[in-house]
Image (cartoon, grey):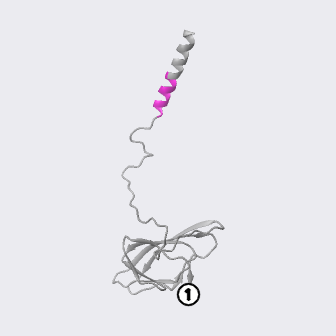
Amino acid sequence: MMKRIAMVALASLALVTAGSAQQPASDNEALPKGFKTTPVLKSVQTASNMTLAYPKAGQAEVVSVTGELEPGGRTSRHQHPVPVFVYVLEGTLTVQADGGEPREYPAGKAFVEDVNHWHQAFNKGATPVKILVVFMGEEGKPTTINAQ
């Protein structure tokens, strides 16, 4: 009996020792070091307070682009059948949605564009506007519909 207890104790000690040997070092390369995140946008609504909804059929697809509007430039009048995230990198972007007041977004601001609602963007400033645009749509479907 004493021999059996000694064997169990020895096996337990071996397991504890092996487990502690596998603990990660405090300077583990898998852990973040010198990295931080800054929230940009968290929203359940578009800029005009429309509720966000994702496509319910087909394969989800994310498309990201950068865009540049020269001073005095404008986009076409258009709408998006999918949610679109916009982050202003440089300059101030002005967005005019049908039936709404113009909204201005300076560098560092983000917003979600209206879904299925006509709008147009302008650069009313003296320097180029640069934006990052992320479309959250469906594979094979358009992300933008231009007015005719």
Q: Residue furthest right?
A: 58
Secondary element at image label 1: loop
Tell me how many marks there are: 1
Closest to the observer, 90 or 55: 55
The residue under the point 51% across, 18% down is: 9
Is residue 74 on the magenta stretch? no
Instruction: Look at label 1 and name its amino acid.
Output: Ala
**Residue 16: x percent and y percent?**
48, 26
The residue under the point 54% across, 76% down is: 115
34 left or right, relative to 120: left
The residue under the point 46% across, 30% down is: 20
104 left or right, relative to 49: left
- In the picture shown, does residue 136 fall above or below 93? above
- In the picture shown, does residue 124 fall above or below 28? below
**Residue 148: x percent and y percent?**
57, 90
- In the picture shown, does residue 132 fall above or below 121? above
Q: Residue furthest left?
A: 126
Q: Main secondary structure of the magenta part?
A: helix
**Residue 117: x percent and y percent?**
53, 81
Q: Which residues are magenta?
A: 13-22
Which residue is under mark 1? Answer: 147
Is residue 18 on the magenta stretch? yes
- In the picture shown, does residue 37 fall above or below 83? above
**Residue 31: x percent and y percent?**
43, 46
Closest to the observer, 69 or 40: 40
Q: Residue furthest bottom?
A: 148
The crowding category of the residue bearing disc 1, from other C-alpha atoms within 10 Å (few below 14, some 14 to 19, many at least 20), is few
Q: Quadrant of residue 138?
A: bottom right
Quarter of the N terminus within the rendering: top right
Q: Quadrant of residue 56?
A: bottom right
